Image (spheres, helix red, strand yellow):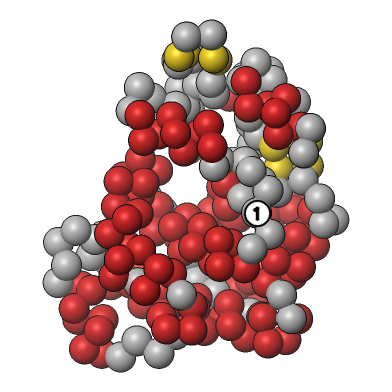
């Protein structure tokens, strides 16, 4: 997430300062970001999206999310894992997508690694949530400047995922992933979502 000192408000709501006036961004912040996710399919989608974000803004990814859902079979790992050369060329020629060959190849690579983790452990959710002991970490940051970009947990996750064959899973990407899927509650304390998610 981009860190700014601007605090966006809507009526009486106070949001985290990285949220812009873009309604898509606000909806994502208000309804998805930081909500604990345990469904394997949802966790896979976010893993792919976070990898795509590397070097880009999150709003760029959000605006392309529906396009990716359309062309990636709704982020179905079993289908993505067997994409052939023809399919990859098709994806690389789609101007709606981020046409980065390394990122595109990583989508297929990560689908295969994801399926292997499922086969080995029975559940990607159980595997990935072990890095925070199975339940969300409740942080209490007073400002965006306090929020880390990586932690010992995201470092450990990164190393483990790389050993499993995943790409675009550096410590910073892993921490952004942990924030997105609710493994940590990193809504700042004055954000209205902080207390709502703390109760979960």
Q: Measuring 38% from the left and 25% from the top, which residue is drawn there?
A: 20
The quadrant in which residue 189 appears is top right
Residue at 50% x, 34% y is 29
Density class for disc 1 (Cα within 10 Å; few <14, some 14-19, many ≥20) is many
Q: Tell me the residue at 40%/34% (across/down).
A: 25
State the image quarter where residue 128 is shown.
bottom right
What is the x, y in percent for residue 142?
68, 18
* Residue 134 as seen in the image, left or right of residue 78: right
Number of marks in picture: 1
In this rendering, position of residue 35 left or right of residue 30: right
Question: Which residue sits furthest top?
Answer: 12
x then y, percent, for residue 119: 68, 87
Against 50, residue 184 (above or below) is: above
Q: Where's residue 79, x and y in %?
A: 42, 83
Query: Helix, strand, or loop for circle 1?
Result: loop
Residue 153 visible to the viewer: yes
Q: Residue at x 77, y 39 (%)?
A: 200
For residue 27, above or below residue 43: above
From the image, tell me which residue sits under label 1: 37
Answer with left or right where residue 100 lies relative to residue 184.
Answer: left
Q: Is residue 179 above or below residue 144?
A: below
Q: Is residue 139 visible?
A: no
For this rendering, which residue is in front, 102 or 89? 89
Q: Residue furthest right?
A: 133
| Residue 98 in the image, given as x and y percentages of width and height | 26, 60
Q: Is residue 114 left or right of residue 194?
A: left
Q: Nearer the viewer, residue 76 or 47?
A: 76
């Amino acid at each position: 997430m981009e860190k700014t000192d601007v605090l966006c408000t809507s009526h009486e709501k106070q949001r985290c300062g990285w949220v812009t006036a873009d309604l898509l961004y606000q909806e994502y912040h208000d309804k998805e970001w930081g909500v604990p996710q345990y469904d394997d399919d949802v966790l896979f989608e976010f893993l792919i999206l976070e990898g795509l974000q590397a070097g880009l803004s999150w709003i760029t990814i959000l605006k392309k999310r529906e396009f990716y859902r359309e062309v990636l079979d709704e982020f179905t790992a079993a289908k993505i894992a067997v994409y052939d050369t023809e399919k990859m060329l098709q994806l690389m020629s789609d101007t709606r997508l981020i046409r980065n060959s390394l990122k595109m190849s990583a989508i297929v690579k990560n689908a295969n690694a994801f399926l292997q983790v499922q086969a080995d452990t029975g559940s990607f959710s159980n595997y990935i949530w072990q890095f925070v002991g199975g339940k969300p970490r409740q942080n209490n940051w007073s400002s965006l400047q306090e929020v880390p970009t990586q932690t010992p947990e995201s470092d450990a996750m990164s190393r483990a995922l790389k050993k499993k064959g995943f790409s675009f899973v550096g410590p910073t990407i892993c921490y952004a992933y942990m924030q997105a899927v609710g493994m940590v509650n990193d809504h700042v304390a004055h954000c209205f979502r902080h207390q709502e998610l703390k109760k979960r």
